[in-house]
């Protein structure tokens, strides 16, 4: 029944080339899963200075590529690509003026680059021009987040009768509605969106330009990364101002749960962790726990539960709420914490200072470290995510596979992926709370810790259930396939 489609993915991140969060993980796996279903997929992203050209064996592919911006500016860039052996080709737009910088979106002090609207507006136009130059005629253009949200708009404004792009339907996936790309009107001419479109149901947002809002208007179909978050973002509490526009999309706004790349996140094959293990043979997990305790200078003791945290330090993740509970937890319960993350400077100072104040009981690493993320998933007993909101969340799904039970606030993708523990039946895969408060964190942690010490049979049963859950990408890729067909059927002009 499914037609085989040509799909172009536009993204600002993709594993293993550039990553700041889950978006990169999604782009590192979904395209392959779509290809497995028979579709032809290409990915295009910026060539940041941090991408190691030699290691990834990138080669020049197209030079020059001329991109006309709205202000009449003509930008000349070039395009690199991955070796032909890679199943899904990834193309990289090289343009030093915008991408020859250490960060993806901000400098070392987490200050956003001032020209971000121009950087990503340019990138998006370059990606579309690239299709035209090489004659790649997509059935679907799939854009992700505000950075590439202008793609559906450019298609409709500039390329509606183009022989290459004119038939392409557009899909926009919102990975996080907290980031909309809102900028001053001084960038509007350069972006080439035409002033008659600067109205409140398209780009205008309190006299500023809103990339995501415009993308929602123009996309043939909008999706987000879990069913619960799709429902939540239809309400003002969660939509950061965009609820009416999402509701306007009606059935053309859907939630599709992310999957997990089990080639990367699976303790049976993970080469980054100290020892491998599986649900049939858990001995390796004990080794991972011991090594984790050692590495973070915690008391090496297999009896004490270790609670892991891996997170960007931003409001969304509720780490201030955890901060209000963590010390009383450590003072009143026999537990250890391992924290990995970076972002907000106050939170960095707070979590960075805890090991000094609670030696042997709290370990932390302030920074970004992929290997440590794998170590924490494998070596912890529990994993906590007290998110204010969570579009999908990947770490809790990784945790399930590593037999590390998630303790989560029941929101967004956390609600969709973690099943509440039932003390009578001993079923479930984690511990959930609803209220966003340090007290709720404290009591839920107490519940998890007492289960750990006093109900070992239940704990074992939960771990087993967690590890055998299947969140592989195939199911999600099938849902995207259907979404693409809907977008094609719905394409209006
Ligand atoms: P988000 O995209 O909102 O940050 P997700 O749970 O979807 O949340 O994805 C986060 C991804 O980023 C996971 O793969 C996680 O392991 C990784 N990650 C987050 N912070 C760090 C860090 N400090 N070091 C290494 N990996 C990190
Ligand atoms: C965003 C969200 C996160 C989601 C990820 C991948 O960064 O914050 O919840 O898992 O995108 O879709």
Image (cartoon, rainbow, N blue to C red):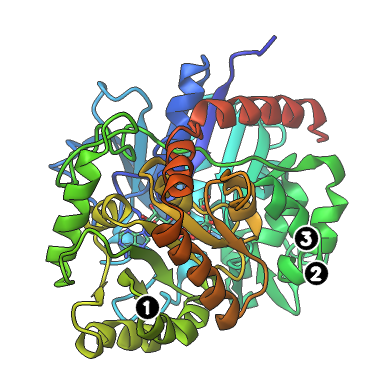
Which secondary structure, mark 3? loop
Whether 334 is drawn above or below 266: the answer is: below
State which mark lies toward you, 3 or 1: 1
Residue 83 in picture, x, y percent from top left: 23, 27
In three-dimensional space, the C-alpha distance between marks 2 and 1, rounded to whole angstroms, equals: 28 Å
Q: Which mark is residue 202?
A: 3
Q: Which mark is residue 386?
A: none
In three-dimensional space, the C-alpha distance between marks 3 and 1, rounded to whole angstroms, equals: 29 Å
State which mark lies toward you, 2 or 3: 2
Count residues near mark 1 (Cα–Cα under 10 Å), then give few for <14, some for 14-19, many for 20+. Answer: few
Which secondary structure, mark 2? helix
Q: Quadrant of residue 468?
A: top left
Whether 322 is drawn above or below 203: the answer is: below
Give the quadrant of the N terminus: top right
Lower sequence index among marks 2 and 1: 1
Along the line of sight, the residue nearer the viewer: 475 or 426: 426
Give the residue at mark 2.
Answer: 236
Residue 433 in picture, x, y percent from top left: 62, 66
Do the residues bearing badges 2 and 3 touch, measured as CB atoms within 8 Å?
A: no
- Please identify the residue farthest to the top as the structure is shown: 1
Lower sequence index among marks 2 and 3: 3
């Amino acid at each position: 029944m499914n037609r085989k489609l040509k799909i172009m993915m536009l993204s600002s991140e993709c594993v293993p080339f550039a990553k700041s969060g889950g978006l990169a993980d999604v782009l590192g796996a979904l395209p392959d899963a779509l290809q497995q279903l028979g579709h032809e997929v290409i990915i295009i992203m910026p060539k940041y200075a941090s991408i190691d050209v030699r290691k990834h064996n990138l080669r020049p592919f197209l030079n020059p590529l001329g991109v006309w911006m709205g202000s009449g500016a003509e930008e000349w860039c070039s395009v690199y690509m991955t070796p032909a052996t890679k199943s899904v080709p990834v193309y990289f737009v090289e343009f030093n003026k915008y991408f020859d910088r250490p960060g993806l979106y901000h400098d070392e002090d987490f200050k956003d680059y001032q020209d971000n609207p121009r950087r990503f507006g340019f990138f998006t136009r370059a990606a579309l021009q690239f299709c035209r130059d090489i004659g790649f005629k997509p059935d679907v253009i799939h854009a992700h987040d505000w950075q590439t949200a202008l793609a559906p708009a450019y298609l409709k404004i500039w390329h509606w009768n183009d022989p290459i792009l004119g038939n392409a339907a557009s899909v926009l996936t919102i990975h996080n509605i907290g980031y909309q790309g809102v900028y001053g009107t001084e960038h509007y001419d350069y972006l080439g969106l035409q002033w008659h479109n600067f109205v409140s149901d398209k780009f205008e947002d309190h006299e500023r330009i809103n990339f995501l809002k415009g993308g929602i208007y123009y996309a043939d179909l909008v999706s987000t990364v879990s069913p619960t978050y799709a429902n939540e973002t239809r309400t003002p509490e969660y939509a950061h101002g965009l609820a009416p526009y999402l509701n306007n999309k009606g059935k053309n706004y859907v939630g599709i749960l992310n999957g997990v790349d089990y080639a990367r996140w699976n303790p049976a094959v993970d080469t980054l962790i100290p020892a491998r293990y599986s649900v049939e043979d858990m001995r390796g997990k004990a080794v991972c726990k011991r090594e984790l305790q050692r590495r973070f200078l915690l008391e090496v003791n297999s009896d004490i539960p270790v609670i892991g945290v891996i997170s960007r330090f931003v409001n969304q993740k509720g780490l201030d709420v955890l901060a209000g509970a963590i010390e009383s937890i450590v003072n009143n319960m026999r537990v250890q914490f391992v924290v990995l993350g970076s972002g907000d400077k106050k939170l960095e100072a707070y979590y960075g200072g805890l090991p000094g104040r609670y030696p042997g009981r709290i370990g932390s690493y302030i920074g970004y470290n992929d290997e440590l993320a794998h170590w924490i998933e494998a070596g912890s007993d529990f994993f906590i995510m007290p998110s204010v909101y969570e579009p999908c969340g990947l770490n809790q799904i990784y945790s399930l596979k590593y037999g590390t039970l998630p303790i989560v606030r029941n929101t967004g993708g956390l609600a969709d992926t973690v099943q509440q523990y039932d003390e009578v039946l001993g079923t479930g895969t984690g511990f959930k709370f609803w209220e966003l408060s340090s007290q709720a964190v404290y009591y839920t942690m107490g519940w998890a810790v007492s289960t750990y010490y006093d109900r070992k049979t239940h704990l074992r049963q939960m771990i087993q259930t967690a590890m055998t859950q299947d969140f592989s990408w195939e199911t999600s890729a099938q849902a995207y396939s259907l979404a693409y067909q809907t977008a094609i059927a719905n394409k209006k002009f």
